[in-house]
Amino acid sequence: MTITKNLTALLVATVIFLVSCSSSKNAPIAPRKDFKGNWTITSARLQGADGKVNVTAFDDAALKCFEGSEWVLPNNGYGSYTINGGADCPGGARQIIWSQRVNGGTTTFNFKKMDGVKKSDSKHVQEGYSLEVTSFTENSFVAQSPIQFEGKTVYIVYTFEKR
């Protein structure tokens, strides 16, 4: 009976040790090939801020304008997103170059706006956007971008659904 108690105690201690040493963040690893395709942003929201906050997303349009926007992400990296016009939303397509990176177990979705830029000059575009992918499935992913608001970090959270 003493051996059973000792083995049980050892097993419990091992499990506690392994759980405490494991990563607390269970970030998904999403390969580039899984991002390819046509996507729609079904939700664009601010997380961590109280009240109504006006946010311009991607230095382009109000956050609400991105709900329903369509994103085309082809294999060659030269894609686009289209905002539906109306209600203070500047409609139309925007050309982008996109990529996916994995760093330290975290997947990021990155893009640069390329409107008016020749493909051959894309390497000279310095400014871009990086979204941390917080969940990923075959048909959807959620990505967030941190911003500073009233002295604290809040997140713009986008939900993408595959079309």
Image (tube, rainbow, N blue to C red):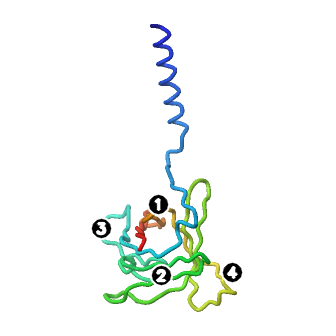
Extreme residue in the top direction: 1
Kind of residue sitting beneath label 1: Phe
**Mark 2 or 3, closer to the camera:** 2
Check the image and name the residue furthest to the bottom.
Answer: 116
Assess disc 1: are there few (<14), some (14-19) or many (≥20) residues with their C-alpha within 10 Å of its C-alpha.
some
Kind of element beneath mark 4: helix
The residue singled out by tag 2 in the image is 81
Residue at 43% x, 65% y: name it: 139
Q: Please state, as top left, top right, bottom left or bottom right, where the C terminus lies in the image.
A: bottom left
Residue 123 has which mark?
4
The residue lying toward the viewer, choosing from 3 and 13, is: 3
Give the Cα separation between the discs numbered 4 and 2: 20 Å
Q: Amino acid at mark 4?
A: Lys
Q: Distance of mark 4 from mark 1, alpha carbons?
A: 28 Å
* Labelled pair 3, 4 in contact (Cβ < 8 Å): no
Q: Nearer the viewer, residue 45 or 152?
A: 45
